[in-house]
Image (cartoon, grey):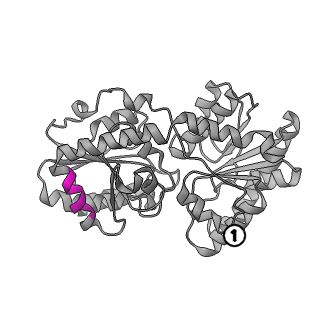
Amino acid sequence: MLHGSSDLYGASRIFLISARSLKEQGHKIYVCLSEEGPLSEALRKLQIPVKVVRLGVIRRKYFTLPGVFNRFQVMRKANYSINQWIEAEQIDTLYSNTAAVWIGAWVAKKKNLRHIWHLHEIITSPSWFKNFMGKMVNRYSDKVIVVSQAVYDNWATSVNNNKLVRIYNGIDYENYTEPVISLRDGLNISPNTCVIGMIGRVNPWKGQTYFLKIAEYLNKNFLDLLFILAGDTFPGEEYLYEVIKGKIKSYQLEDRVIDLGFRDDIPRVLATIDIFVLPSVLPDPFPTVVLEAMASGKPVVATQHGGAVEMLDEGKAGMLIPWDDPKTAASQIAKLIENKALRNELGEKAKNRVLNHFSLTSFKKNLNGVFEKEQYN
């Protein structure tokens, strides 16, 4: 199993659940990660062997000629290490998590191994890259797991439909359904303050700056509001913090925004907020944090594209807002600020939906089914 990071954000958390589930099913699991971190620690606690190999993970910053050359050089070195492990342990299947990890596909093809690619992404631009990725995934995969119907539709134009398998993510909701102590006392937040929060990796498409623009409109119309951000950047993209700080200052939100950075106590962060917002400006394939917010009984407000539309049942279990109109988005969120009963109603609907439709049991069952050998007979 190959994955390009060692954090515990959405795709990494699903990777951890997948590895644990396959191990429980009786498979012998070996993991290659690009770095040490919380994920590698969690895997080793499960007694899953972990090797750290720079996999040549593809990110947008490498979309230059020197960047592409760098990635291929790194992948050449990774190829040697992975091949050694395959031969030593008689590995028969390679699993690549996310479209950013390419090396597993090429190694599997060269050594005639089964390759399963787990895609969490919706790729729309640039068009040349989308077309290239589609052809590569189709050629170098036996099965392609996609995390939502939105992701399925995105890849179905270039990947054979008999290879595509839609499996909704599921997580253990116990930490979110049980009461936890919020952060309000520690942050000196009044019980009467309405707290609106977002949680996610800091990057341009996740929508932190869009969230702050919405906050600017709301702050002009309500006195007792507070906005919380939680999440950190990829290494090398720390400059994005300065962008966020600049927006907070220009929108005059210095005393209205708390930036928590990376947190490993997400249940407590969610217990602190009254309204959860997913402000992604590009389609978010199937954001795990929305599952967590729903399980916590929070009213979820999400931009109207990507997997969140399915998760919220077309807006019946939450509120959908535009991804390019902060004024309209703010006016819709204002209805929740003004109406606590509506917040409670949407929070209860969200909780019921996540427990009934996105269970961990279903995820494990469907995932294990993909790895059964009869799937390839």
Image x and y of residue 12, in percent: 57, 42
Image x and y of residue 41, in percent: 59, 30
Count residues near mark 1 (Cα–Cα under 10 Å), then give few for <14, some for 14-19, many for 20+. few
Find out whether residue 304 is within the magenta segment: no
- In the displayed structure image, the side of residue 17 where residue 222 appears, left or right: left
210 or 202: which is nearer to us? 210
33 or 268: which is nearer to us? 268
Magenta part of the chain: 329-336
Q: Residue at x 68, y 68 (%)?
A: 158
Q: Give the residue type that dot 1 points to.
A: Phe
Residue hosting label 1: 132
Secondary structure at numbered mark 1: helix
Give the dominant element type of the magenta stretch: helix, strand or loop: helix
Judge whether residue 298 can be spotted in this image.
no
336 or 97: which is nearer to us? 336
Q: In which quarter of the image is residue 280?
A: bottom left
Q: Residue at x 67, y 53 (%)?
A: 101
Judge whether residue 203 can be spotted in this image.
yes
Q: In which quarter of the image is residue 273?
A: top left
Position of the N terminus, as image quadrant, is top right
Q: Residue at x 48, y 57 (%)?
A: 284
Image x and y of residue 10, in percent: 51, 45
